[in-house]
């Protein structure tokens, strides 16, 4: 059974159809990439899956259960988190404080509003462990604003991990990154994907080839093709509409 499915997911903005009857199955434990030209509806699909938009029609299933009518916090509580959904990077806090805030929000999500000070101080230990997992422990006490772009994005992943998601949605994790940061984040995503399911929008096809078990191509709001990267690359229609001229 797929962990996450979209069934006929449609979103209209006025007279404009941004996603048009999208069917998608994301298998447990896989890294699934969503690709397609600008305006294809990738971000809209993410916003639908995490309930930032309400679908005009269609269904979303998590573990086979209809979650179409749940609120964003309820979806987070069920273990599906989009990066930047709950946590953003606070520039004037240290990295440790940033992760601690995310952990405190998780405590809030668990509906445990009050904790003894000793329990809250344990959050520092957990925050440090998370920073260690993503390779930022050495910078725990530096301000987020002092970090490079790549490290800020890494910190965002750490704050997402603070919610311990089973299903992580990453919208263009490599956007704006140089080659070195791309390699770093690639190995980070591979590590955090162990024991989790990852759905990611990514324009960098080298990254998609390296990381994705499965690829869905969206064009004009609809699924154009689905398969392994090799299958997608060999698909004539995909080449014409997407991988042609400017994507090599
Ligand atoms: P992608 O992420 O694949 O580039 P988007 O999902 O952002 O595509 O956008 C798909 C289409 O839907 C675009 O034509 C965009 O202009 C339109 N769109 C997205 N959000 C809105 C909105 N809130 N209101 C109106 N049109 C929107
Ligand atoms: Mg987008």
Image: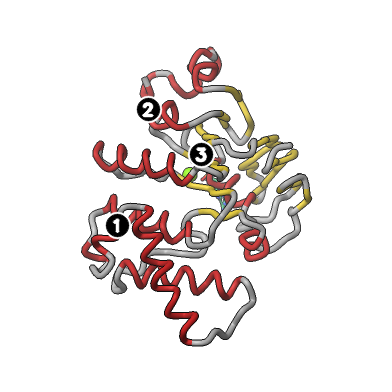
Give the residue at mark 2.
206
**In front: mark 2 or mark 1?**
1
Mark 1 is surrounded, within 10 Å at the Cα level, by few (under 14), some (14 to 19) or many (20 or more) other residues, namely some
Give x and y (percent) for residue 44. 58, 47
Vertically, is 107 above or below 25? below
Q: CA distance from mark 2 to mark 1?
A: 25 Å
Q: Earlier in the sequence, mark 2 or mark 3?
A: 3
Give the residue at mark 3.
39
Vertically, is 108 above or below 232? below
Q: Is mark 3 within 8 Å of ligand 1?
A: yes
Give the residue at mark 1.
136
Q: Earlier in the sequence, mark 2 or mark 1?
A: 1
Q: CA distance from mark 2 to mark 3?
A: 21 Å
- In the rendered structure, the answer to whether residue 163 lies left or right of residue 146 reads right
Mark 3 residue element: loop
The answer to whether the residues at label 2 and label 1 have Cβ atoms under 8 Å apart is no
Give x and y (percent) for residue 92. 29, 73
Mark 2 residue element: helix
């Amino acid at each position: 059974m797929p962990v996450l499915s979209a069934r006929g997911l449609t979103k209209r903005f006025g007279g404009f159809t941004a996603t048009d009857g999208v069917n998608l199955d994301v298998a447990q434990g896989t890294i699934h990439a969503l690709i397609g030209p600008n305006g294809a509806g990738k971000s809209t699909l993410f916003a639908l899956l995490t309930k930032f938009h309400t679908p005009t029609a269609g269904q979303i299933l998590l573990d086979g259960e209809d979650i179409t009518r749940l609120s964003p916090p309820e979806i987070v509580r069920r273990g599906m988190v989009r990066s930047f959904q709950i946590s953003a990077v606070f520039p004037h806090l240290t990295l440790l404080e940033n992760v601690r805030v995310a952990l405190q929000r998780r405590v809030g999500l668990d509906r445990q509003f009050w904790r003894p000070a000793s329990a809250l101080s344990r959050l520092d230990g957990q925050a440090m462990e998370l920073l260690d997992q993503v390779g930022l422990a050495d910078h725990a006490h530096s301000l987020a604003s002092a970090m490079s772009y790549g490290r800020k994005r890494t910190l965002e992943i750490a704050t997402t991990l603070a919610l311990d998601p089973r299903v992580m949605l990453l919208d263009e994790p490599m956007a704006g990154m140089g080659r070195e940061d791309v390699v770093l984040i690639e190995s980070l995503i591979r590590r955090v994907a162990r024991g989790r399911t990852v759905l990611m929008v990514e324009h960098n096809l080298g990254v998609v080839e390296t990381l994705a078990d499965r690829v869905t191509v969206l064009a004009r709001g609809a699924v154009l093709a689905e398969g392994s990267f090799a299958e997608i690359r060999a698909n004539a229609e995909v080449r014409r509409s997407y991988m042609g001229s400017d994507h090599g």
